């Protein structure tokens, strides 16, 4: 079956429902389907995919499909807001004279909003960074700063984008981290940050205007929250490679808030808290600066720019949990990620994820040797997750998902442990040189 691009867009149910066009006016791309991220009062309720057989899709044609898929979730949100239940989706938007309780809660959170530092690490992708910064500057949050970390720059292209286009803005700062590696850059950004919350993101994302409000909501959700992850969906599905990435797992972890810790909120999963991808993505990870200082920052032997390629976010989740903090997955802390468009880039990414996962496991066992016996007992379950088509890791993969991607991920996993030990030695040498 020939792949047809899928239009990804957001729809807010409290507003008049829009007409959806099947042709991108900027690129001329003709979409065969649309994925609607459906929200009510900026709360994501779910994704609904619909075919686009005509040039336009009118609200009267798609509203019943949204109601069939998400009617229960819509009414649950309305009941939580103190609004009456509905029996169908109004085309003119859901309204009520009473201010919804979720917005009243938001107003209370914003009465004394803490300073949040948005840290964006980048390496020689000025055009992509520009798109990201444009979205960050549209944030609907009253107290934030932006720290752009130029990681091991080879040119001055990143500096030019930040200083020449945005240098007049007092809440944007540019810093340089000479050592190559995302964790070096994240740590430099964190130390430069003035906020009590550090919202880490990457240059290949587009943040929603309400992202930081969602981050703040996540930190208010528990008793001792150290980190907050948010909902991350694709910015586009214009190529089959981007769809395959979603089938491989993607970044979307659902539309319900989740609290994780090592006590009352410890899920009954054999690999917890070592489950890869359970909590979210490092491109949408906010951490309290005090918690980051307590656990010792990101491990520079992990992550993009090193031979371990990634795994740094997984290690941070475990460090926070083992230190007694809670992690919150908060869907209203929402952003979109620009997936790789070409197959070679996807192959490299899947391989890197394999490397990063076992590199992270190696770090965790190295730092906590007493956990090795328990980990060994869980290896059979890990093999099931990796190889079984029915496991939650593989259940999204369709018949056309390339088998060689599975092989590349396994090859990466076989290399990851050695890669971490080698990267750890290299990192120790760099740390001695910096002293």
Image (tube, rainbow, N blue to C red):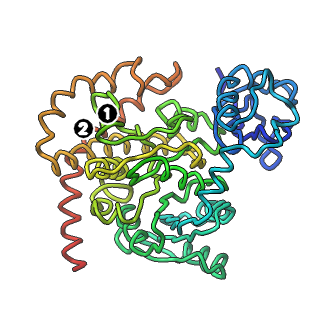
Image quarter of residue 307? bottom left
In the displayed structure, 245 sits above or below 306; it is: above
- Secondary structure at badge 1 equals helix
Q: Mark 2 points at which residue?
A: 414
Mark-to-mark CA distance, 2 and 1? 6 Å
Q: Nearer the viewer, residue 17 or 134?
A: 17
Q: Which residue is drawn at 27% across and 28% down?
A: 270
Q: Mark 1 points at which residue?
A: 410
Image quarter of residue 176? bottom left
- Secondary structure at badge 2 equals helix
Horizontal side of 234 relative to 319 (left or right) equals right
Q: Which residue is drawn at 80% across and 23% down?
A: 88
In the displayed structure, 108 sits above or below 163; it is: above
Report x, y in % for residue 424: 21, 58
Report x, y in % for residue 57: 85, 30
Report x, y in % for residue 419: 24, 50
Image quadrant occupied by the C terminus: bottom left
């Amino acid at each position: 079956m020939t792949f047809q691009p899928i239009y990804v867009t957001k729809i807010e149910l409290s507003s008049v429902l829009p007409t959806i066009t099947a042709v991108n006016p900027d690129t001329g791309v003709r979409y065969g389907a649309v994925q609607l991220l459906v929200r009510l009062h900026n709360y994501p309720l779910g994704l609904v995919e619909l075919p686009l057989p005509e040039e336009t899709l009118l609200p009267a044609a798609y509203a019943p499909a949204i109601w069939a898929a998400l009617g229960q979730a819509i009414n649950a949100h309305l009941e939580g807001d103190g609004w009456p239940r509905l029996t169908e989706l109004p085309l003119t938007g859901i309204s009520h004279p009473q201010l919804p309780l979720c917005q009243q809660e938001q107003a209370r959170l914003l009465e004394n909003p803490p300073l949040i530092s948005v840290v964006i690490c980048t390496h020689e992708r000025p055009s992509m960074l520009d798109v990201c910064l444009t979205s960050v500057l549209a944030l609907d949050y009253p107290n934030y700063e932006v720290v752009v970390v130029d990681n091991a720059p080879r040119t001055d292209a990143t500096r030019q984008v930040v200083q020449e286009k945005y240098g007049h803005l007092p809440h944007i700062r540019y810093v340089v981290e000479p050592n190559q590696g995302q964790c070096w850059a994240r740590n430099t950004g964190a130390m430069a940050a003035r906020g009590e919350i550090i919202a880490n993101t990457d240059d290949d994302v587009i943040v929603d205007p309400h992202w930081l409000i969602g981050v703040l909501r996540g930190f208010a959700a528990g008793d001792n929250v150290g980190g907050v992850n948010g909902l991350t969906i694709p910015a586009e599905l214009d190529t089959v490679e981007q769809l395959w990435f979603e089938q491989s797992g993607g970044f979307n972890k659902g539309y319900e808030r989740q609290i994780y810790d090592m006590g009352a909120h410890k899920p009954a999963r054999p690999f917890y808290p070592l489950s890869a991808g359970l909590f979210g993505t490092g491109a949408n990870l906010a951490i309290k600066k005090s918690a980051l200082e307590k656990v010792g920052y990101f491990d520079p032997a992990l992550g993009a720019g090193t031979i371990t390629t990634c795994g740094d976010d997984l290690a941070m989740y475990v460090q926070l949990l083992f230190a007694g903090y809670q992690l919150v997955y908060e869907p209203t802390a929402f952003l979109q990620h620009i997936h790789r468009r070409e197959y070679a880039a996807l192959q490299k990414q899947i391989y890197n994820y394999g490397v990063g996962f076992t590199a992270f496991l190696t770090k965790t066992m190295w730092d906590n040797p007493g956990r090795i016996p328990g980990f060994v007992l869980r290896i059979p379950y890990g093999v099931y997750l990796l190889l079984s088509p029915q496991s939650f890791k593989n259940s999204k993969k369709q018949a056309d998902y390339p088998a060689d991607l599975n092989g590349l991920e396994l090859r990466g996993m076989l290399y990851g442990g050695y890669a971490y030990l080698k990267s750890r030695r290299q990192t120790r040498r760099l740390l001695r040189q910096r002293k």
